[in-house]
Amino acid sequence: MTSYTYDKKRYITGIILPNVVLMGCLAVFALYDNIVIYKGFDLLSLVLVVAVYTLFNTLVALAYPQKIVDTGSAWEFHAFGRRHVYPKGELTSFHIRDLANSRIYLRVNGAKLVRGRYWIKLKMYSDGEALYRAFHEIEHEMHPEDLKFNRRPSHTQTME
């Protein structure tokens, strides 16, 4: 069993504070504006929609996992005392979008609204390079026909 854990201090300052505290405050302020002094749809109404969506992604969909565990038979994504489990035999799709600054956007099993979409900042995890290689091996096994595997040899891209 291999466990990849987000650095605790950075998880608090990089995920929890911005996503929960700030968006929670904005949501309360926008709700107050829309209920108490309703003026129709304005900028604060848009802020309310964005705040609710961000809180949903963080708290319900677990889009920012604090810990990722490879149990050997399944992948587990943990955050806020909950987990999403994907048995390896039941994986139907596994797509990675590489982004700047060693970040990836991972979509698992069709990526539904409440699970299967994960934003992963690899440098913040213990042994993020190994996590990156493990994810790309799974994607390559499941989708060898993807263009990214035809244009360059597997695993030549690094986190840098």
Image (cartoon, rainbow, N blue to C red):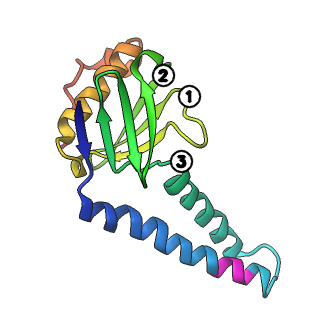
**Dot 2 surroundings within 10 Å: few (below 14), some, or many (20 or more)?**
some
For the C terminus, the image quarter is top left
Q: Nearer the viewer, residue 111 or 12?
A: 12
Q: Is residue 35 left or right of residue 8?
A: right
In the displayed structure, would residue 29 be above or below residue 77?
below
In the displayed image of the protein, which residue is found farthest to the bottom? 37
- What residue is disc 1 on? 110
Marks 2/1: CA distance? 6 Å
Q: Which of the 4 image quarters holds residue 149? A: top left
Marks 2/3: CA distance? 18 Å
For the N terminus, the image quarter is top left
Q: Which residues are magenta?
A: 29-33
Q: Is residue 152 left or right of residue 109?
A: left
Q: Which of the 4 image quarters holds residue 32? A: bottom right
Q: Which mark is residue 93?
A: 2
Marked residue nearer the N-terminal end (2 or 1): 2
In the displayed structure, would residue 9 be above or below residue 145?
below
**Dot 1 surroundings within 10 Å: few (below 14), some, or many (20 or more)?**
some
Amino acid type assigned to the residue bearing label 2 in the image: Ser
Give the residue at x 54% y 34%. Answer: 111
| CB atoms of marks 3 and 1 within 8 Å | no
Badge 3 element:
loop
Marked residue nearer the N-terminal end (3 or 1): 3
Q: Nearer the viewer, residue 38 or 16?
A: 16
Amino acid type assigned to the residue bearing label 1 in the image: Gly
| CB atoms of marks 2 and 1 within 8 Å | yes
Where residue 124 appears, as percent x and y from the top left, is 24, 52
Name the magenta segment's main secondary structure.
helix
